[in-house]
Amino acid sequence: MEYAGTLDGSAPVLRKFPVGETVTDIGVPIRCGIAISAGVRMVTTTNANDLLGLSEDTATYSTTQGDPEGVVSIIVNPGARYRARLYGGATDSPMPIAVVTTAMTAGVDVVAAATNFQTPDTKDSGFIFGYTGVNAGVFRKITSVSSVTATVTVPFPNNSQIGDQFTFGPFSGIQGRADQFVGLSTDLLAVNVDLPQDADNNNFRVVEFELKTAFEEGDVSSHVILAPFYHAYSHSGRTLI
Amino acid sequence: MSRDAAARVAQWTPLRRQSARAAGGWMSDLVALEKAISLCFRCAHKFNAKSQHYARATGIERLHGFVIGECDGCEMTASRTTLFLPEQNIGTTWRQL
């Protein structure tokens, strides 16, 4: 992930924190430590309670006397936005692509026989984006799914033909908090679109999409802009999990 | 924020160089550890970033022009500091900005 400005346009505030575990990557979300921690720690793929921000450098945690103290720099604005790539799985992999197998007639049903929009998790209330074909570059929210069909309410401008492609994911960024949290990749640097929608993640909300078509190799270059849901310096009032 | 979280946050004070230590040595340590370095306008021009294989975080400067933070040189909390990052990190953290 990378810092992508703030929602309110305020300037970034940089602080340094001692770490309670080794931070090996730049751009990893860091959260407060628990009571027994010697310092801050990384988030998990589904939990970012008490988030502080992204690591701007790396730090080595050591309890050996004489070793340098592990310190990590973090931009701590509660209103910060973070830009994360979309992975198709838990590790760096292309986004899933649905290939249309039945031509559209009303611009609302994306039928892709080789794709299952319900397994491993439902993409209902997620997003679908024209990757190739006549609807390339068009974003819609999925409002219902069956196993091989994703249905949108606002029709696509054109009727996609057999072979047209779409990318899709389990969140839309335009729905309430109920089920629109994201899941992170195992390296904590990206968003995994293959994880279930989750009402309990309590980590990040999608603010904005930067989806790209096949022309820009969008399956490996699409991003989302995230906002922290439960930042340590905000007042969301959520109970620690 | 919960009371526990607030207490934990309050325990962390910004890390500082020891008072008897010259700023240059502290800066050299930061460079050796490849840390992000923020410097106020009084200190920024004394830091030869290029020779240390550092560069200004141009991505963030494009967004805001500066960072609010404690100067790693003089320890003054400055409303405007310049953020320097190791050159090899520029390509990862700020690649798209």
Image: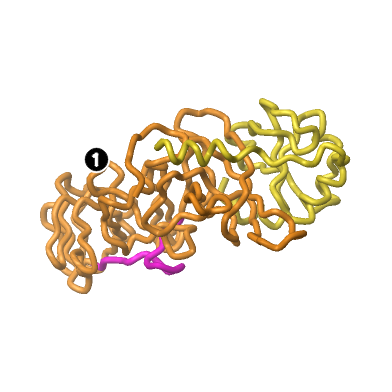
Chain colours: A orange, B yellow
* Whether residue A107 is visible: no
Which residues are drawn in magenta?
A: A85-99
x, y percent for residue A100: 21, 66
Q: Please, which residue is most extreme toward the top here?
A: B79
* Whether residue A213 is visible: yes
Mainly helix, strand or loop, the magenta region? loop
Q: How many marks?
A: 1
Query: Numbered disc 1: what chain?
Result: A
x, y percent for residue B96: 56, 49
Using the image as rendered, state which of residue B67 and residue A163 is in the foreground: B67
Instruction: Using the image, determine if residue B37 lies above or below residue B45.
Output: below
Residue at image mark 1: A176
The secondary structure type at the circle numbered 1 is loop
The image quarter containing residue A26 is bottom right
x, y percent for residue A47: 38, 53
Residue occupying image coordinates x 14% and y 67%: A147
Q: Please, which residue is most extreme toward the bottom here?
A: A114
Residue occupying image coordinates x 41% and y 63%: A87
State left or right for residue B95 relative to residue B22.
left
Q: Quadrant of the N terminus of chain B?
A: top left
State left or right for residue B31 relative to residue B3.
right
Residue type (three-letter) at the residue carrying disc 1: Gly
- Does the magenta-highlighted stretch encompass residue A116? no
